[in-house]
Image (tube, rainbow, N blue to C red):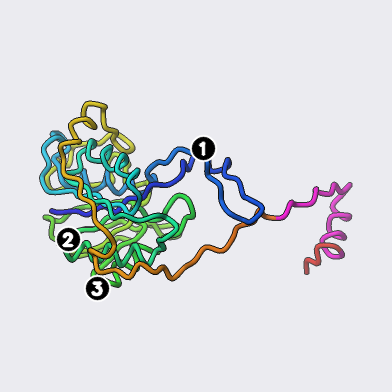
């Protein structure tokens, strides 16, 4: 199985409270360390589990290709992902300011046409603005089946996937034939969430994603990392969504203490206008 994993470099999601706004409404993330979106790390871990025997993860039973749309600096992230087990990496040269979900989806479509993967995996949303449109738009552009919000995946002889989709209060199990597009949740990296045809059913993974040791990252420098441009993928680089400005929410007024339930009901009717 050949899997294409789309990843994105974002400002450290654990410290987003340190982001500042300029008087012009521009976001200032100065000082925040760039990191992979954690949901995309879950997608990579899923791809690795689907293409290996979990008892011998150093031997890949397929091909995993990671791709990002970003500047030269994003190659450090790709090298780390190659160190965890991905076989190849592709960086499509772009800046965040020049991208929106549609540009990325169309760029991925052009890359899929070139690479011919059996499966495209993405995180179900991006950490910095929590949008989740790219996977759905990519599936539409390709005309492929899709499964979103995947918390569990079982490979059926690498010809189809049985996907456990997290829905409100339940899990919907859907079967998608390959090739397909799947977006994953954090539950996908639980010990038994991914079942590959190559891994014994008795095998249990460690909870969470794997990390590359320094030696593995150094060795990954020998793995292929290609650079492309949006024009190479036949994509019109003009985004449809343009950033305007941001503003902080208004400060909330202080709460009011009431002496009893009767006063509370009165205030709800007269001041809060609750019917």
Query: In the displayed structure, does residue 236 sit left or right of residue 221?
Result: right
Give me the disc on residue 143. Answer: 3
Secondary structure, mark 2, is strand
Q: Which is nearer the N-term, disc 3 or disc 2?
A: 3
**Depth check, front residue: 108 or 230:** 230
Please give the range of residues in magenta. 250-270
Instruction: Tell me which residue sits at (60%, 45%) in the image.
Output: 20
Query: In the displayed structure, does residue 60 sit left or right of residue 43?
Result: left
Residue 49 lies in quadrant = top left
> Which dot, 3 or 2, sits closer to the camera?
3
Q: Where residue 275 sits in the image (x, y, percent)?
A: 78, 69
- Are the residues at dot 3 and dot 2 in contact (C-beta closer than 8 Å)? no
How far apart are labels 1 and 3 at the CA level?
41 Å
Few, some or many residues within 10 Å of mark 1 (<14, 14–19, 20+):
few
> Image height check: is 254 above or below 191?
below
Q: Where residue 244 sits in the image (x, y, percent)?
A: 56, 63
Residue 247 appears in the rendering: yes
Query: Magenta segment: does it hold 267?
Result: yes
Query: Magenta segment: does it hold 6?
Result: no
Q: Which residue is mark 1?
A: 31
Give me the disc on residue 160. Answer: 2
């Amino acid at each position: 199985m050949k899997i294409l994993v789309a990843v994105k470099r974002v400002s450290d999601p654990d410290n987003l409270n340190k982001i500042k706004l300029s008087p012009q409404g521009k976001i200032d993330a100065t000082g925040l360390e760039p990191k992979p979106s954690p949901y995309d790390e879950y997608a990579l871990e899923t791809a690795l589990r689907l293409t290996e025997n979990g008892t011998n993860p150093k031997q890949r039973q397929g091909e995993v290709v990671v791709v990002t749309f970003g500047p030269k600096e994003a190659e450090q992230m790709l090298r780390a992902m190659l160190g965890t087990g991905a076989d190849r990496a592709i960086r499509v040269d772009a800046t965040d300011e020049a991208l929106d979900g549609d540009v990325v989806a169309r760029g991925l479509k052009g890359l899929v046409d070139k690479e011919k993967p059996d499966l495209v995996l993405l995180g179900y949303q991006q950490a910095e603005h929590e949008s989740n449109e790219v996977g759905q738009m990519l599936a539409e552009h390709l005309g492929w089946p899709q499964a979103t919000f995947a918390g569990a995946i079982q490979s059926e002889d690498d010809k189809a996937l049985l996907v456990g989709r997290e829905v409100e209060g339940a899990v919907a199990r859907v079967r998608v034939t390959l090739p397909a597009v799947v977006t994953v949740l954090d539950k996908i990296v639980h010990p038994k969430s991914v079942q590959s045809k190559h891994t014994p059913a008795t095998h249990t993974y460690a909870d969470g994603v794997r990390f590359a040791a320094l030696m593995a990252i150094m060795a990954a420098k020998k793995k292929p990392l290609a650079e492309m441009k949006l024009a190479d993928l036949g994509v019109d680089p003009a985004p449809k969504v343009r950033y305007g400005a941001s503003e902080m929410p208004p400060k909330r007024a202080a709460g009011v203490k009431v002496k009893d339930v009767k006063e509370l009901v009165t205030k709800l009717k007269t001041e809060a206008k609750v019917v």
